Structures are given as C-alpha cells and as structure tokens.
Amino acid sequence: MAEQRPPRSPGARDYFDRAATIIPEFTVLNYGFSSEPENTVISSEEPEFYCLRMYEHALGGTALNGCEVLEVSCGRGGGANFVQRTYSPQRLVGVDLSPENIRLARSRAALPGVEFLIGNAERLSFADQSFDTVINIGASHLYDDRTRFFAEARRVLRPGGSFCYTDGCWADDDCTEDLLDAGFELLERTEITANVLRALRRDSARRATLFDGLPDTKLREEYKHWAGVIGYRAFTRFEAGQTRYFSHRLRRPEAESAARR
Ligand SMILES: C[S@@+](CC[C@H](N)C(=O)[O-])C[C@H]1O[C@@H](n2cnc3c(N)ncnc32)[C@H](O)[C@@H]1O
C-alpha cells in the first residue's frame, strides 16, 4: 500500500504566520540572486536588493506593461510591489497561504492596481485564462503537490501567457518533465545555484542582524538555518551541492490540442 504523506500546507502556513509576527521587517523572503556585474535597474541602496534581483531575474525580458499578472505565494508582498513599480502591469494580484503574510502585505502602502488575497497555489480561485503572466518565486517546494500547482498555473494563464518560475530543490529533483506534462512550452531553464550563493554571501550580515535581535536563542538559530545565513543549513546545502536552484521561463502555447483546452 502506498505510504500516505501528511500534508505540508498547514505546517507551512503556521510557520510563515509565526515568522510574520516575530520578524515582520522583511518584505521579501527569497534567498536572492546576484551576478557579476549586477546588471540591474534596482538601486544598490535598496535594503532588499538581492531578493528583488531574484524577481528581476525571474521575469527576464517578460513584458508586463498593461498586463494582468498573478503572483502565487507572494509572501509579504515586497516582490509584487517591486514588480508593479518597475514593470507597470495593469493589475497585479498576489496570493499567499499565510494570512499573516497577507496582513503584512496589505499593511504597507497600497500601490494602484495591486491587491493581496489569501489562497492556495493548488486550488486557485480564478477563472480559466484570466492572467497574462504567473510569477512564482521560491515557494513550490512547500506545496503538497507541485504538479497540481503547475496545472493551476497553466489553467489561469491565457494562451501565449508567461510562467516565470524559480525554486530550490534537492540535487536529484528535476521538475522539467512535470512542467512539460502540465502543458507548458519551456523557453529557458537556468541553474542559478551559484547566483543564489553569491547573493546569500552578500546579504548574510543583514539577515543575521535581524535574527540576532531575537531574545529566544533557539529561534535565532532556527531562523539562521532557514534564511541561508553563511554557515547555516540552507546555505551549506547549496554550497555542498545537496540542493540546487533553478529558474524557468515557460509559456502556455497559443495553439493547443482539444484535449489540453
Ligand atoms: C519563501 S516564501 C517566498 C515568498 C515570496 N515569493 C518572496 O520571494 O518573498 C514562500 C511562501 O510560500 C507560501 N506558501 C506555502 N505554501 C503555499 C500554498 N500551498 N499556497 C500558496 N502559498 C503558499 C508561504 O506562506 C510563503 O509566503
């Protein structure tokens, strides 16, 4: 008999809800991206520079001007706000499982055209073909079934729409077949583990400083492991090649077979 795995979602939701109340300072929660040179429109004064670089990298040349964009697992909304400010979509909806993350996202200055909703990546509450682009950064490893999410991302995209997707994974895990099975056309797949490590090295002090202010020493250590501080678990796994990080640019094909539609 197949072993039943307990669902991850309730644990993920509770973990991010708790982190939102303990360390509300972060507005972006991914590991970051860095390259030499930093080919970017983002100001080097931006405190969350490397995390926003991940969004910039994920989007690549995707044109968003005047488009309807969905960010699945938008976290605390810092990435969505950056995308709205920088690429001027007509509408940007951010969805996240954690009510506390959505509360934080809504508590910040609302940009015109941006809204934040509680929702599950595996059961998106949007009509078929309602967005031009779906963004998903550093979150799918937390889902119970990423193939359900891929099917949902494709369903809500209009034909020809873009799916900009990045995440870390175990070294032997390749999601490409799952993405193709879901009906996407793969435009570009890039391993960016070195870029993530470079960003973590440069951003480590900022992350550690926020955690060092916590009175609970056990929690302080736990968050350093989680957030990829140099020498801690998330960092050492990437460094040792146990985990890797990939970005994918995909498209829902314009013309699809009747079975796919
Ligand atoms: C590492 S954070 C990344 C957030 C954001 N993309 C960023 O870069 O700041 C992962 C996010 O995934 C969300 N998440 C986990 N499982 C989810 C699910 N099943 N549906 C929607 N969001 C989920 C968490 O609540 C968390 O906000």
Image (tube, rainbow, N blue to C red):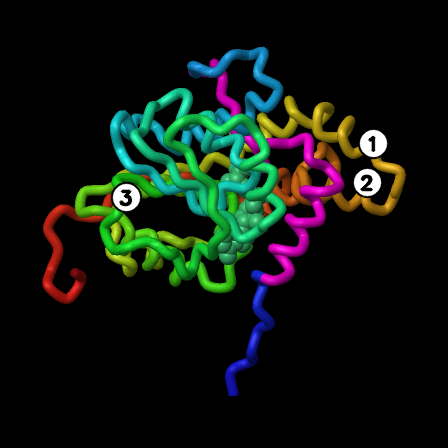
Point out the stretch of residues depicted in magenta: 10-39
Q: Amino acid at mark 2?
A: Arg
Q: Is residue 36 magenta?
A: yes
Residue occupied by mark 1: 212
Q: What secondary structure is found at the residue carrying circle 1?
A: helix
Query: Residue at 66% across / 49% down in the picture?
Result: 17
Please name which of the two marks, 2 or 3, marks the residue nearer to the observer. 3
Q: Position of residue 201 (x, y in %)?
A: 65, 26
Q: What secondary structure is found at the residue carrying circle 2?
A: helix
Whether pointer 1 and pointer 2 mark residues with C-beta atoms closer than 8 Å, the reply is yes
Q: Is residue 115 magenta?
A: no
Q: Amino acid at mark 3?
A: Phe
Q: Nearer the viewer, residue 188 or 27?
A: 27
Residue occupied by mark 3: 131
Query: Residue at 43% across / 16% down in the picture?
Result: 40
In this rendering, position of residue 57 left or right of residue 199: left
Outermost residue to the bottom? 1
The vertical placement of 77 against 56, above or below, is: below
Estimate how packed mark 1 is, as few (under 14), some (14 to 19) or many (20 or more) residues with alpha carbons within 10 Å.
some
Query: Residue at 11% across / 60% down in the picture?
Result: 257
Quarter of the figure with the C terminus = bottom left
Residue occupied by mark 2: 220
Query: Residue at 41% across / 61% down in the picture?
Result: 123
Location of residue 249 by image quarter:
top left
